[in-house]
């Protein structure tokens, strides 16, 4: 071991000791759990997005929005069956995650003409980034045609994008590159497939972006459910109304919160204990769920069957800015 590596390990150990001491004296998630309206999961029965609901969600004055029947139930189930067949035929890709035992398969695979953008960036090659943007255009075009009939179809994520643009005060649309002449367009979302038995029975608690909540910016996701597993278990999501709104609240719980990006069983047990009981969102085919992915959440696990959903991410930069969609 060279001197540089040794000093680096010493520094890491000292930093961990510091945060451990900080957490033991000042930490605790219970005081940071939102109560009242901020902890609410807004439920709409009529299938419609509302501007008022989106404003509450984006400013963290609500924990999630559940729009029942956003997409026609029968159409959702038919799309789900076709995508499940595609996955069973080996067309899905599982992007491995880091665990204490090294890289392992996650519970979620994706379908589509491109990999997720964060995966393309992680590979580190310009050619992978180019392949992502080329695949995005192909994915957007192909999903607008029904493969069984070769007739045009309204892809659920396109429907979501259109209606989001209609109801958000400053509009919404696909994100684009900020540099270069072409400013290529980002993905509008991908199909996600989970097959039973899932690794995490209760679901893997995680966040998709670390950092305190802000009323003027944040990262959110939209999830449209197509096919659900038929094993008589609750299907949907757990979400915790954790409201970390300052760097101090983050730092004094840094060690525990860092576990939200690590598939470690012991940390998962501790997180469930500290976060207490979750809000449970039970979904049906065609439902839409929007949430801030900086709050802890988990897709509920199941033993048998296949769950198919569509997901995209929303970048919020303030009420007077356009919502940007990517994946």
Image (cartoon, rainbow, N blue to C red):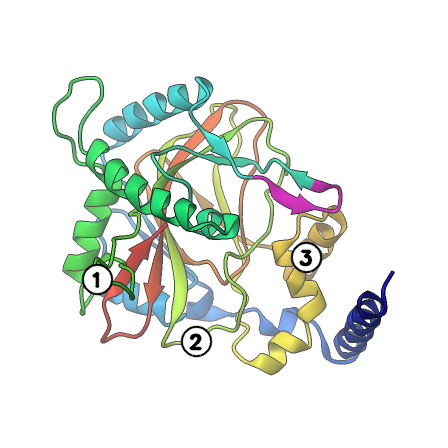
| The residue positioned farthest toward the front in the image shown | 2
Instruction: Find out whether the residues at labels 1 and 3 contact each other: C-beta distance under 8 Å.
Output: no
Circle 1: element type:
loop
Q: Earlier in the sequence, mark 3 or mark 2?
A: 2
Quadrant assignment for the N terminus: bottom right
Q: Nearer the viewer, residue 264 or 326?
A: 326
Q: Position of residue 122 (x, y in %)?
A: 51, 51
Whether residue 47 is visible, yes or no, is no
Q: Position of residue 17 (x, y in %)?
A: 82, 73
Write the residue at 21% across / 44% down. Answer: 158
Circle 2: element type:
loop
Q: Earlier in the sequence, mark 1 or mark 2?
A: 1
Q: CA distance from mark 3 to mark 2?
A: 22 Å
Q: Is residue 251 left or right of residue 318?
A: right
Quarter-wise, where is residue 32 in the image?
Answer: bottom right
Magenta segment range?
Answer: 96-102
Write the residue at 46% across / 21% down. Answer: 90
Q: Which residue is mark 2?
A: 214
């Amino acid at each position: 071991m060279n001197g540089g590596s040794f000093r680096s390990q010493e520094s890491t150990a000292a930093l961990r000791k510091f945060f451990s001491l900080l957490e033991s004296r000042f930490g605790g998630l219970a005081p940071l759990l939102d109560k009242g309206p901020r902890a609410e999961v807004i439920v709409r029965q009529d299938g419609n997005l509302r501007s008022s609901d989106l404003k509450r969600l984006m400013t963290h004055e609500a924990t999630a929005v559940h729009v029942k029947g956003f997409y026609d139930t029968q159409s959702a189930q038919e799309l789900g069956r076709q995508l499940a067949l595609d996955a069973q035929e080996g067309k899905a890709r599982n992007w491995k995650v880091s665990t204490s035992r090294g890289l392992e398969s996650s519970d979620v695979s994706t379908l589509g003409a491109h990999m997720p953008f964060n995966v393309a960036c992680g590979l580190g090659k310009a050619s992978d980034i180019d392949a992502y943007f080329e695949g995005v255009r192909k994915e957007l075009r192909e999903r607008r045609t029904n493969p069984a009939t070769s007739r045009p179809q309204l892809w659920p994520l396109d429907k979501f994008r259109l209606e989001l643009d209609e109801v958000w005060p400053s509009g919404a649309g696909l994100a684009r590159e900020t540099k270069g002449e072409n400013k290529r367009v980002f993905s509008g979302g991908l199909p996600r497939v989970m097959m039973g038995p899932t690794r995490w029975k209760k679901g893997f608690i995680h966040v998709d972006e670390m950092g305190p909540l802000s009323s003027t910016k944040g990262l959110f996701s939209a999830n449209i459910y197509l096919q659900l597993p038929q094993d008589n278990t609750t299907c949907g999501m757990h979400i915790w109304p954790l409201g970390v709104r300052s760097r101090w609240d983050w730092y004094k719980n840094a060690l525990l919160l860092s576990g939200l990006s690590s598939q470690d069983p012991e940390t998962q047990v501790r997180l469930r204990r500290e976060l207490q009981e979750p809000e449970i969102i039970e979904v049906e085919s065609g439902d839409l769920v929007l949430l801030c992915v900086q709050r802890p959440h988990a897709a509920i696990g199941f033993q048998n069957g296949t769950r198919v959903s569509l997901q995209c991410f929303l970048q919020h930069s303030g009420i007077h800015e356009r919502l940007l969609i990517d994946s």
